Image (cartoon, grey):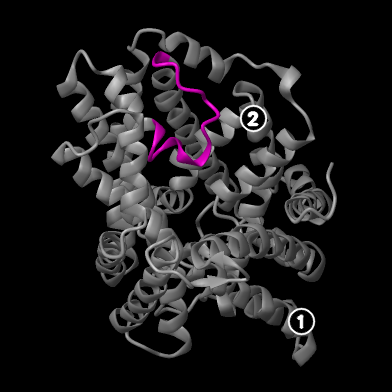
Amino acid sequence: MSHTTERANFGSKLGIILATAGSAVGLGNVWRFPYMTGQNGGAAFILIYLGCVLLLGIPCMLSEFIIGRHGAANTSRVYAKVAESSAADGEAPSRWRLLFPKFIGFLGITTGFLITSYYAVVSGWCLQYIYASAAGELKGDANYVTNYFAEFSTSPLRPIFWTVAILFITHFVICRGVRGGIERASKLLMPTLFILLLVIVVASCMLPGASEGIRFLFKPDFSRVDSGVFLGALGQSFYSLSIGMGCLATYASYYSKKTNLLTSAVQISFVDSFIAILAGLMIFPAAFSVGVSPDSGASLVFITLPNVFNQAFSAMPIVGYVVALFFYALLSLAALTSLISLHEVSTAFFHEEFHLKRNRAALVVTVFCSIIGAFCSLSLGAVDGITLFGRPLFDVFDFVTGQIFLPIGGFLTCLFLGWFVPKKLIRDEFTNGGTIWTRSRLFTIFLFLIRFICPVAIAAIFLNQLGVFTL
């Protein structure tokens, strides 16, 4: 099925790489990857993680690229369009035959929308910490920093203000369109993020005792490896590459027929993994320098690191001030690039399915995500009773999307492309209609991975996270 002439496309190969890498690069890299690495033994976890990216991440990403580009529509429709293309010539697919792909597409839209709503809350915290760093509000001992985060995150108004603020920044970019908004913003934000990251890495590695952190990050200790480390690495690769959220299929729907999908998937995965490792190189040397445990967990960014900056640069407070400011600016940029892609998933849906103008479709998403985000923020302690199944609304959204919807979406996508879509269609997209060298061996490996290896690995993550069994 060909692209419609009205549909927007990315304008350059660099734009494709930076925009899609920006979709993948987010808090999962700069926040979640370092604390997962710390909790799972450092270098050994990284090696296993990179293996998971190669065997699981790239094939799953390429699957979404193939579906997105071929269908050339928003995520809710694109799977059904591929199914229609898969039917025999002159044969309309049955209603039941379309039900499965339509469900996958709708699941992607729902997942992207819910993640946008609660992800904006954490993204807003990053903006608050830029302000707090600039105003010198993070100076103090460990108890002070801990209390500061607890008081801020449970405040009724400030977190909501920053949640709405970052959603409207995202809204402004989305309203500018694919080339004028998403692509142009990515060309500015991604290099800026990379430069800030390098500056903080250099500052961190120059601290006394930083070599212990570098050794932790790059010298494997395989004695700490168990089944939990493997499953953690699998889950992190899935989370970090934004698989199953609808972002990759949506962005791929703007790819031209000349885009080399395999090369793009490899390049984007490399950029994503490289930035994740740099984030570890930014955090662990500083943490070891002041004697902070590398397995501090999810509190590493908002509680542990301000204390690290205060101690590590106590002799040079102005340097500590600048590093802290740069770090939270970096974190905000990482959050923004992911929010842009998540917002676009829902915006494209409302724009194409309800025939709304792009600006109006974006406003619908921004307003509803702001409302839901506000309730998620309030559920963290500002207001009692905003719970579901006895848990705060924020935690419910995080659990349902991250541990249920994402694995199911990735699992079903692999089954759909591997067993439902004709091999010829997949090969045509894989080789750009035969214009790229045939890669027959690589294509055979790819098909084997998405038919067998990826579904089994994703099912293992899913069932283990739900506690159905423990490997």
Residue 340: quadrant of the picture: bottom left
Does residue 203 appear left or right of residue 38 in this picture?
Answer: left
**Residue 102, above or below 8:** below
For the stretch drawn in magenta, the main secondary structure is: loop
**Looking at the image, residue 196 lies above or below residue 409:** above
Q: Which residue is mark 1?
A: 87
Specify whether residue 313 is in view: yes
Q: Residue at x 16, y 36 (%)?
A: 136
Looking at this view, is 204 or 445 the one in front?
Answer: 204
Magenta-colored span: 289-304
- Tag 1: residue type? Ala
Across and down, in percent, residue 63 comes to 66, 58
Q: Position of residue 417 (x, y in %)?
A: 74, 64
How far from the left and from the top, in percent, is residue 359? 28, 79
Residue at image point 62% right, 49% down: 238
In this rendering, which labeled residue sits more in front, label 1 or label 2? 2
Residue 291 highlighted magenta (yes or no): yes
Instruction: Report crowding for label 2: few under 14, some 14 to 19, many 20 or more residues within 10 A (C-alpha).
Output: many
* Image spot of residue 374 (x, y percent): 36, 70
Q: Residue at x 66, y 80 (%)?
A: 102
When asked about the image quadrant of residue 7, the answer is bottom left
Vertical placement of residue 133 versus 386, above or below: above
Q: Residues within 10 Å of mark 1 (few under 14, many from 20)?
A: some
> On screen, 423 above or below 264?
below
Q: Secondary structure at mark 2?
A: loop
Q: Amino acid at mark 2?
A: Asn
Inter-mark Cα distance, 1 to 2:
46 Å
- As rendered, which of 125 and 408 lies closer to the eye? 125
Q: Using residue 66 as the reference point, say whether residue 193 is left or right of it.
A: left
Residue under numbered circle 2: 40
Q: Nearer the viewer, residue 25 or 72?
A: 25
